[in-house]
Image (cartoon, grey):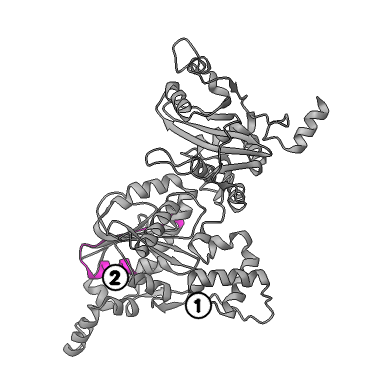
């Protein structure tokens, strides 16, 4: 600054007071081709910056550069507002290191010398991902954040984090999101990763508020998340010469539906790009490059055992309002816990269908509570199917669980034998699911404080993620979805249908058993 004339210095100081000018003129990044370029917000980055609320949820397609914008925005705040504490949370350690080195430090190191002279770095910690400036401001890039009060927090790819690293996501939700003082800025951005998890739930809440605000029945407060959606067609790079790209009738029907819902006119070049990209991405297209917010969550969660089957149930209209036939007995299927959750499915067989008409879960109770729950529902009961450990003796000093429950009216009880290989039981559930229908209300999200619902658990029951190999293992991840899913597996392993075979057996297995009997 001392090398500038007084007049030039005065003009520059005037420009430096304008954040939008700073974002377009001070910071360098590397583009998609690895070239050093001056950062200038693209359409999506500019829209998010212009419409930034205190709390923000950005559901997006790939490659809009929102994390790049967040790193530059955090650096800008740190440089020009003293005592700013900014946090960038990545969903993997590798991404955190890359964001810090290639975005935050790269932009700082390529600032004008005069600006670095008046805002020198007093700490550059590559291991912890921390940049501290002499004005008391700092930026930390990590996989979580706990401690201290943040002025700005950006969480990148929260959907995959919830799916692959659920414990880390819980830490972010309880730690980083609680480190934001009222009125400061949070941006949670992600592609979708199936219709389950904290990112999905937050998006559903924010989208419902959008509908309420439009209807005049809701108000966006500083404690509500503003919903932002950035589909594939907001990126100008997603275009292709349409010559030689066939657009079929089904494609045109789809595009017309998208245009009507999104109030956007797709060009021939955009349609050609989508058709070609969809041919390459196939079942991942809607997740990676969604056209509408609802579509983004249609794709099955990777690693979810029953993702495809539950998506099929939804698409085929088998998750609906199911009437209960009072003349047909309702069978129950349990997974039993005491300090852990006890989950109960209620099912009646109607013709070819296994109708799961109700679901209940709770924790910390003995059998008396669950006997009362069954009685209050007033159903005509058939058999009660319990897991292999149903005969354990932890509900009474002198009697096992079956004996205690039977005295309370829960009978007859069928104790389903244990299957040593849990993956065999999971396959039995997959065999059963095409025959299943679900009541969307009684099996869906319950009242606050009563779990998350059976349907949600079946969608979310997932494999463990191996961080070292970056692949899903063959073993289930034990979380809140495990007990409802295990109770459902009790049905596949233990219920004998009117055809005389267990509903989870494949037809080929049943025929083999018949031949050898």
Q: Secondary structure at mark 1?
A: loop
Q: Is there CB contact under 8 Å for labels 2 and 1?
A: no
Percent across and percent down for residue 8 are: 21, 88
Question: How many marks do you count on the picture?
Answer: 2
Question: Where are the magenta residues, as a range?
Answer: 73-94
Separation of residues labelled 2 and 1 (CA atoms):
26 Å
Q: In the image, is 399 to the left or to the right of 100?
A: right
Q: Is residue 422 magenta?
A: no
Residue 36: percent from left, percent from top: 43, 77
Q: Is residue 84 magenta?
A: yes
Q: Residue at x 61, y 63 (%)?
A: 281
Q: Residues within 10 Å of mark 1 (few under 14, many from 20)?
A: few
Quadrant containing the N terminus is bottom left
Q: Quarter of the image containing the C terminus?
A: top right
**Residue 102 visible:** no
Density class for disc 2 (Cα within 10 Å; few <14, some 14-19, many ≥20) is some
Q: Which mark is residue 76?
A: 2
Q: Residue at x 56, y 29 (%)?
A: 332
Q: In the orientation shown, which residue stands out farthest toward the right?
A: 515
Residue 146 coordinates in the image, percent (x, y):
31, 49
Which of the marked residues, 2 or 1, is nearer the chain's N terminus?
2
Side (left or right) of 484 relative to 49: right
Q: Vertical placement of 205 versus 438: above or below?
A: below
Camera-side residue: 454 or 356? Answer: 356
Q: Identify the disc placed on residue 236.
A: 1
| Secondary-structure class at tag 2 | helix
Q: Residue at x 43, y 55 (%)?
A: 204
């Amino acid at each position: 600054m001392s090398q500038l004339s007084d007049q030039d210095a005065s003009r520059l100081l005037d420009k430096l007071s304008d954040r939008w000018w700073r974002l377009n003129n001070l910071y360098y990044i590397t583009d998609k081709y690895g070239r050093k370029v001056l950062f200038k917000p693209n359409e999506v980055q500019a829209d998010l910056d212009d419409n930034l609320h205190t709390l923000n949820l950005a559901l997006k397609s790939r490659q809009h550069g929102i994390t790049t914008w967040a790193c530059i925005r955090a650096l800008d705040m740190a440089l020009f507002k003293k005592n700013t504490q900014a946090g960038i949370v990545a969903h993997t350690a590798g991404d955190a290191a890359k964001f810090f080195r290639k975005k935050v430090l790269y932009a700082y190191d390529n600032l004008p010398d005069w600006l670095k002279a008046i805002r020198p770095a007093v700490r550059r910690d590559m291991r912890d991902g921390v940049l501290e400036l002499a004005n008391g401001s700092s930026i930390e890039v990590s996989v979580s954040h706990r401690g201290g009060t943040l002025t700005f927090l950006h969480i990148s790819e929260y959907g995959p984090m919830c799916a692959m690293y659920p414990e880390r996501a819980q830490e972010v939700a309880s730690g980083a999101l609680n480190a934001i003082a009222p009125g400061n800025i949070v941006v949670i951005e992600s592609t979708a990763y199936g219709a389950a998890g904290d990112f999905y739930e937050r998006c559903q809440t924010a989208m419902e508020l959008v509908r309420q605000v439009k209807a005049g029945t809701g108000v966006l407060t500083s404690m509500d998340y503003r919903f932002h959606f950035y589909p594939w067609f907001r990126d100008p790079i997603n275009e292709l010469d349409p010559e030689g790209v066939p657009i079929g009738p089904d494609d045109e029907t789809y595009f017309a539906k998208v245009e009507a819902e999104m109030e956007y006119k797709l060009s021939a070049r955009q349609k050609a790009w989508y058709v070609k990209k969809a041919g390459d991405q196939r079942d991942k297209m809607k997740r990676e490059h969604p056209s509408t917010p609802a579509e983004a969550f249609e794709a099955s969660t990777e690693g979810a055992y029953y993702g495809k089957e539950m998506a099929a149930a939804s698409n085929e209209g088998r998750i609906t309002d199911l009437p209960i036939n009072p003349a047909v007995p309702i069978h129950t299927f349990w997974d039993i816990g005491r300090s852990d959750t006890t989950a109960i499915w209620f099912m009646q067989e109607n013709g070819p269908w296994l109708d799961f008409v109700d679901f209940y879960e709770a924790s910390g109770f003995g059998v008396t509570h669950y006997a009362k729950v069954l009685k209050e529902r007033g159903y005509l009961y058939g058999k009660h199917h319990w897991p292999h450990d149903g005969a354990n003796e932890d509900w009474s000093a002198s009697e096992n669980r079956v004996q205690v429950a039977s005295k309370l009216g829960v009978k007859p009880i069928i104790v389903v034998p244990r299957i040593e290989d849990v993956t065999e039981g999971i396959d039995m559930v997959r065999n059963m699911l095409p025959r299943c229908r679900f009541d969307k209300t009684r099996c869906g999200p319950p009242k606050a404080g009563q779990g998350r619902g059976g349907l949600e658990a079946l969608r979310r029951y997932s494999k463990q993620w191996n961080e070292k190999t970056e692949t899903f293992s063959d073993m289930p991840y034990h979380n809140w979805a495990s007990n409802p899913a295990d109770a459902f597996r009790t049905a596949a392993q233990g219920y004998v249908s009117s055809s005389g075979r267990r509903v989870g057996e494949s037809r080929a297995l049943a025929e083999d058993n018949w031949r050898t009997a």
